[in-house]
Amino acid sequence: MAPENTLPGFQAAISEGADGVELDVRRTADQALVCLHDAGLGRTTNGRGPVREHTLAEIRRLDAGGSFGRNGHRGVPGAPGVGGVRVPTLPEALDALPASALVDVEVKCRGEGPDGPARVADLLAATLAGRPDRDRILVSSFSRKLVAAAVPTLEGISVGLVTSALVPLGRALRGAELCGSSVLAAQAPAYFGPKARLTAARAVDAGFQLLAWTVDDPETARRLADLGVRVIVSDRPGQLRRALDSAR
């Protein structure tokens, strides 16, 4: 519908019926958090080189929408988001979304060196300090070290561990428990592996919020809900919501 990790993309998701958005953040050379998935600028902007080697001012000058049509996606006629779209900062993204919208902030920068995760956690805390909407924010990462550093640093904000289908759900839950996180964001097929139903039930009983990514099929969404999954990440939220609503 619109370029990824941009304000038009977030707004399109909400308009389609999503309850919130998942976005990715990386660190600029001058320690700003910007909404970009890749370590490099080339795929989604007209820039080149690593994000971490560019300042926020340099990234603000880039176009994050011009490559949208060339990367295998098509916007609908009249939809915003193709050409002239800027890379938003994390605060700009939060400010642009409805106050009721859940925002899953997946942190792609994990920090270099033994104290790197702690520095990233401190940057997140400073960026989000004083926000009145902390209860609708989820910070997540594939990095166990970053999650462990973020849990005590981000008071009032949920922190989750992200895992792929290559990690059995039981092992993923143990990792999340060791990190002290309250959310487990597992790739959808992990919920259908051996003993996954028992693991999901144990996680729910322990107070974990379960999230699954990425689900576009309504029947899969229903099966996940039956397992106790309460948050589903989808590339097609409007279609998924309409299918689920029509089946009620």
Image (tube, rainbow, N blue to C red):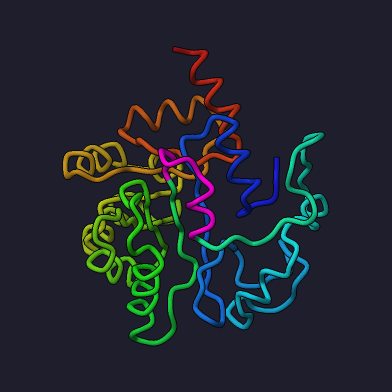
Can you give x and y, in whole percent of width and height, for residue 61 in the image?
72, 70
Q: Residue at x 33, y 61 (%)?
A: 130
Q: Residue at x 30, y 53 (%)?
A: 158
Q: Residue at x 42, y 43 (%)?
A: 102
User: Horizontally, is 31 left or right of 130 in the view?
Assistant: right
User: Can residue 99 be found in the magenta stretch?
Assistant: yes
Instruction: Give the answer, above or below, for where 141 lies relative to 74.
Output: below
User: Horizontally, is 198 left or right of 71 in the view?
Assistant: left
User: Horizontally, is 110 left or right of 202 in the view?
Assistant: right
Q: Which residues are magenta?
A: 91-102
Q: Residue at x 70, y 45 (%)?
A: 2
Seen from the viewer's position, the closer of residues 88 and 144 is 88
Seen from the viewer's position, the closer of residues 72 and 157 is 157
User: Can residue 93 be found in the magenta stretch?
Assistant: yes
Instruction: Give the answer, above or below, for where 142 lies relative to 6.
Output: below
> Outermost residue, left direction?
206
Seen from the viewer's position, the closer of residues 188 and 31 is 31
Quarter in which the N terminus is drawn: top right
Can you give x and y, in whole percent of width and height, for residue 240 in the image?
55, 28
